[in-house]
Amino acid sequence: MMTILLQWSVEQLQPYVTQTREEILAVLEVPPRPGLGDVAFPCYALAREWRKPPDAIAEELAARFNEGASGVSAQAAGPYLNLSFDPQQWAPKLLAAALAHDYGHSAVGQGQRVIIDMSSPNIAKPFGVGHLRSTMIGNALANLYRISGYEVVTVNHIGDWGTQFGKLMEAYKRWGNEEVLKEAPIRESLRLYVKFHEETEEDDTLEAEARRWFWRLENGDAEALRLWQYFVSVSLEEFERVYARLGVKFDHTLGESFYNDKMEAVVSQLRELELLEESDGAQVVRLDDEGVPPCLILKSDGTTIYPTRDLATALYRKTEMNGDLLLYVVGGEQKLHFQQVFHVLKRMGVGWSHQCRHIPFGLMKIDGRKMSTRKGQVVYLDEVLDEAVRKAEEIIEEKNAALDNRREVAEAVGIGAIVFGDLKHNRMLEVDFSLDEAIKFEGETGPYVQYTAARGYKLLKTGMDKGLAVDEILQDGVYLYSAAAWECLKMVAAYPAAIEEALRVHEPSVLARHLLEVSKSFNRFYNQDRVITESSEETLAKLGIVAAAVQVLRSGLQLLGVKSPQQI
Ligand code: ARG
């Protein structure tokens, strides 16, 4: 994953081999150890054509290559031809690219609009760990799409409709009061919800009352509407506080209720297309040919249901919002739901169902705690965030007690630890999150990357204080680069490729892990080379690498939704 060097290698090799550019690029490898050069070209493919053993070809190529080329040397190692780029000549080119202000940007997505369904918590229920993952993964993907030239529209598809509101209204009328609800909307709603379920076991009128409330709501009853609006607004306010702490914004917050008046059209369209069939009194679309269970459209009492709403939503996002790509960042447990919805769209003949994609992710536990709403055992996200910030504050206290804006930095580090700790894992993995591990400043953590960036920033500042400005860095690249410096620069050079790959597989973890590699190589360089030396020429050349690494770490963290304080 180091596109620029690979591309240069293709150019270097082409005059000597009979393969096409694409064929060369496809076989190039990164050698497993630094001593083996920068890029390895395996000679197997040529062996057949040239009727010689690959080892002999490698020898022959190395000899011819070294006669001709300058700035790159070749070495045969068994069947491999290893290329080493002379840092003296190539480092300035890598640096020039990396120090450009739009490093990492591309225009591949120009003219394409992506709609991202993300976060989407449910009103009157806690913001679950799954919603946190959806928020973080969705936010990182939105940033990755944006930096790649796409137009991105993020939508928070709030769960603000459903029979649970009937239960909540009944419970509120019986056991609730406005003050308590306003004080702690989610906790109080959850208490009411749990109490409702406990009491139904004794009192069987409760369920019927709840159904009546929901019926009133669906039929526009003023009191039911007023209560509903109240529940929605207090819950949203609480969610907003979490989003503000996470630094996440949405282009639209459109609840499920937004589609209430758009459902009938979907149902009648399905009916006209003769896709609806009866099944135990309910209306379904059969998907036997797709090998998927039928998709429920209308319940036996004639009411619409989750999939119906998602059909209306998708149609809206396509036709009203003009999305070219519709992404749904939702837990893996909803895989079947999205399969069904997308298949039904296809059966409706929309012609764009392949532009819909579910981006699933696995379950996450925080220190072994899982969330389950029914029993009321819940991890409250704001508590987890507070806990992380407290721990970060303790560590900072130890490391740098003199730091002025300690609270602010602790907030960035504590929350950054959670976000990065989540995003560094392949999204499908079930993550058992240990807060203590995630918050460490050593190891593969967010704070480690943040700390590395701050350390680099400090070096730049020292340079500036000596009058060595970063804009002079590129003027003169004459300096013998150490192996550590060169390795760090190569990691920096691979940043655009990491972004490209992260986007291709919809995996922020590809970028997160790349930032860990950049940090490790930077720290090796930092520990082995003295950056600030007597010679200002040498210092400037080294500061160039520092500046490029800092740039990549800070912009990469930003893409992931993690802040990077200048001082820690
Ligand atoms: N509110 C739902 C839940 O918590 C997630 C909604 C996901 N988005 C969608 N368009 N279905 O399970």
Image (cartoon, grey):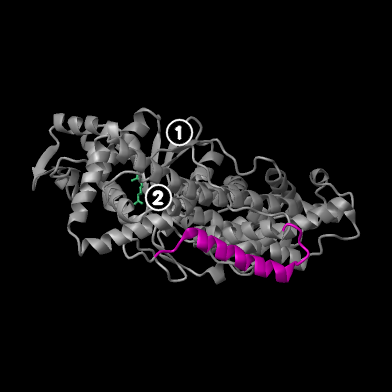
> Which of these two is toward me, 40 or 313?
313
Whether residue 196 is in magenta: the answer is no
Q: The N terminus appears in which quarter of the rendering? A: bottom right
Relative side of 325 to 539, left or right: left
Instruction: Give the labeled residue for mark 2.
Output: 121
Name the residue rendered at 18%, 33% in the picture.
270
Within 8 Å of ligand 1, the CB of disc 2?
Answer: yes
Name the residue rendered at 67%, 69% in the picture.
395
> Which of these two is toward me, 76 or 161?
161
Asked which secondary structure carries label 1, the reply is strand
Residue 230: tell me if it is visible. yes
Q: Which label's residue is closer to the chain start, 2 or 1?
A: 1
Whether residue 382 is in magenta: the answer is yes
Q: Give the extent of the magenta segment.
A: 378-405
The relative height of residue 269 versus residue 534 in the rendered view (above or below) is above
Relative side of 202 to 142, left or right: left
Q: The C terminus appears in which quarter of the rendering? A: bottom right
Q: Position of residue 431 (x, y in %)?
A: 44, 65
Between marks 2 and 1, how big is the CA–CA gap? 24 Å
Q: Position of residue 436 (x, y in %)?
A: 56, 71
Q: Position of residue 81 (x, y in %)?
A: 58, 59
Residue 195 placement: quadrant:
bottom left
Say which amino acid is labelled 1. Arg
Q: Which mark is residue 527?
A: none
- Main SS type for the magenta part? helix
Instruction: Give the labeled residue for mark 1.
Output: 113
Q: Position of residue 526 (x, y in %)?
A: 75, 64
Relative side of 93 to 426, left or right: right
Q: Residues within 10 Å of mark 1 (few under 14, many from 20)?
A: many
Q: Residue furthest right?
A: 534
Say which amino acid is labelled 2. Pro
